[in-house]
Image: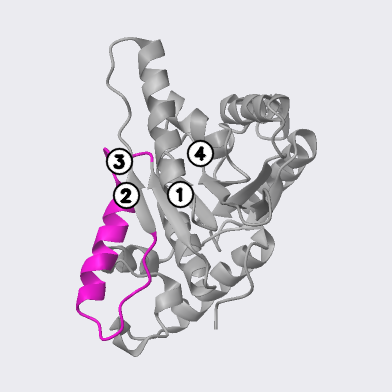
Amino acid sequence: MARSGPHIIVPHVIVLGNEKGGSGKSTTAMHLIVALLAAGKRVGSIDLDARQGSLSRYLENRRKSSDGMLTPLAMPAHIGIRQSEADSREMAKAEDEANLEAALAQLQACDFIVIDTPGSDNALSRAAHIRADTLISPLNDSFLDLDLFGRIEDAGATIRRPSIYAETVWEQRKRRAMAGGRPIDWVVMRNRLSSLDARNKRDIGRLLDQLSRRIGFRLAPGFTERVIFRELFPRGLTLLDLSRQDAGVQWRMSHVAARAEVRDLLATLNLVPDVVD
């Protein structure tokens, strides 16, 4: 966490970014939020996809579940932002950036701010990326999803060059550096890993390793496709909440494995002490 002066805390901004929907950004954001809260941090969250509002709905479900519990669930200070509908592209961009700045200012007292971005390229998403201290990009383990990061050629044998999303991140990194900001720690996490197609996993892993050395991101373990993640959403819970007696979820072996995945991700990010018991 950066500090400016002896009494001013500058929040550490974590952005969940990927231009493809369904990559697991909101699920990852929610687990990070709860992990940070469990570590005793003051946490703010911003949903930049307020029209779809996956993170906002997740938190609303959490609030409703909390109302029926003996001990309330920890909650972040949350803000949802809708993309500008101004006719002029320049006016829309200015309005989006002003709305994001206002939200960040409102959450200035937080230790961490977690921002969930839409699965598309727009001015609001780009404005968030340039403000990221840590950028986390969940990536489904498929060649189709990987193609947004690097242009795959030779029947999947090589990556010829960075693709559209990687180029977007590169541009925001340059803009941030020119403005005197700290480098963005970019972490790509492999989500929805399959235990069946070992060859596919090896090939994608090899290509990601090539690309990480070329454009500078770290690789992190992600979440396997597990039913538990879908089951927890309507209740607003995360795997970190399941040790509570009032969680109302019966433990299964798959939950233990899923919590281990969360532990591995948190260890790679190295943002807070281990909070998964």
Quadrant including the C terminus:
bottom right
Q: Earlier in the sequence, mark 1 or mark 4?
A: 4
Residue 260's place in the image compared with 32, above or below, is below
Q: Which residues are magenta?
A: 48-76
- What residue did someone put label 3 on? 50
- Residue for point 71% across, 24% down: 178
* Camera sees residue 122: no
Callout in the foreground (3, 2)? 3
Q: Nearer the viewer, mark 4 or mark 3?
A: 3
The reply to whether discs 1 and 2 touch (Cβ–Cβ < 8 Å) is yes
What is the C-alpha distance between the residues marked 4 and 2?
A: 15 Å
Q: Is residue 171 left or right of residue 53?
A: right
Marks 1/4 in contact by CB < 8 Å: the verdict is yes
Callout 3 touching callout 1 (CB < 8 Å): no
Question: Residue 254: image x %, image y %?
Answer: 46, 77
Q: Secondary structure at mark 3?
A: loop
Badge number at residue 54: 2
